[in-house]
Amino acid sequence: MPENPERLSTTRFPVAVDAALREAGWRPGRWDIKLAEEWADALRAYASPAGHRHTVFPAAVEAWAEFGGLRVAGPGPGRQTAPPVVRVDPLPGLHLARTLADLGRALDTELAPLGVEGDDQAVLAIDAEGRVYSIDHTGDWYLGPDFDRALTGLVTGLQPVRLTLA
């Protein structure tokens, strides 16, 4: 009898991350472009009182479409840090247009909000190349060169790299 394909792990993510994603409702091929476009429209429509605006680009829209609305919890205590719950929803970052623009300028890129860690303790952002960052009260952090590796680090409790001025 063939094995249930819903129970098979992908090779895209480590087993523990794949399990956490599936528990959150993700499946290979998941794609909610309607939700991603609604978020893109909301972000484009927002302007801060000082006129700062969000940028929206394909890397952000693709991450929102595949993972949008998921609340992913780590399966254990974490390797180096306690894994936060990761919620993929850019709207908690709506009022951070200036913060993201400032960090983007420092990194020579553009940033869009991606989601949050924990109970909104940190905002996740993605740049035009797909790199992922976390911004919290302690500083700015580099999570990985793409969403898959950033999510893997968060879910497994890997210590992120703090961004510093050179």
Image (spheres, rainbow, N blue to C red):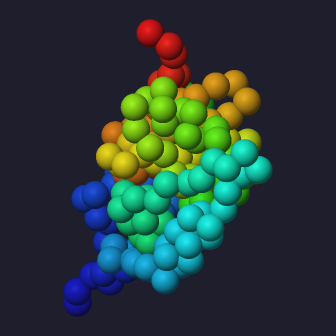
Which residue, as the protein is rendered here, is positioned at the far front? 51
Q: Residue at x 51, y 16 (%)?
A: 164
Rendered image quadrant of residue 10: bottom left
The vertical placement of 64 against 50, above or below, is below
Q: Where's the N terminus, which quadrant?
A: bottom left
Out of 43 and 21, give the one closest to the viewer. 43
Observer-nearest residue: 41 or 65? 41
- Percent x, y for residue 93? 66, 53
Q: Is residue 116 visible?
A: no
Count of picture labels: 0
Residue 125 visible, this angle: yes
Q: Is residue 126 above or below residue 79?
A: below
**Residue visible at 44% across and 54% down in the picture:** 17
Quarter of the image with the C terminus is top left
In the figure, is residue 115 to the left or right of 143? right
Q: Position of residue 39 (x, y in %)?
A: 57, 70
Left or right: residue 154 versus residue 30 is right
Q: In this rendered view, identify the residue nearer to me: 120 or 22.
A: 120
Q: Position of residue 48 (x, y in %)?
A: 71, 51
Write the residue at 44% across / 72% down: 65
Q: Quadrant of residue 18?
A: bottom left
Q: Position of residue 87 (x, y in %)?
A: 61, 59
Quadrant in which residue 103 is drawn: top right
The furthest residue to the top = 166
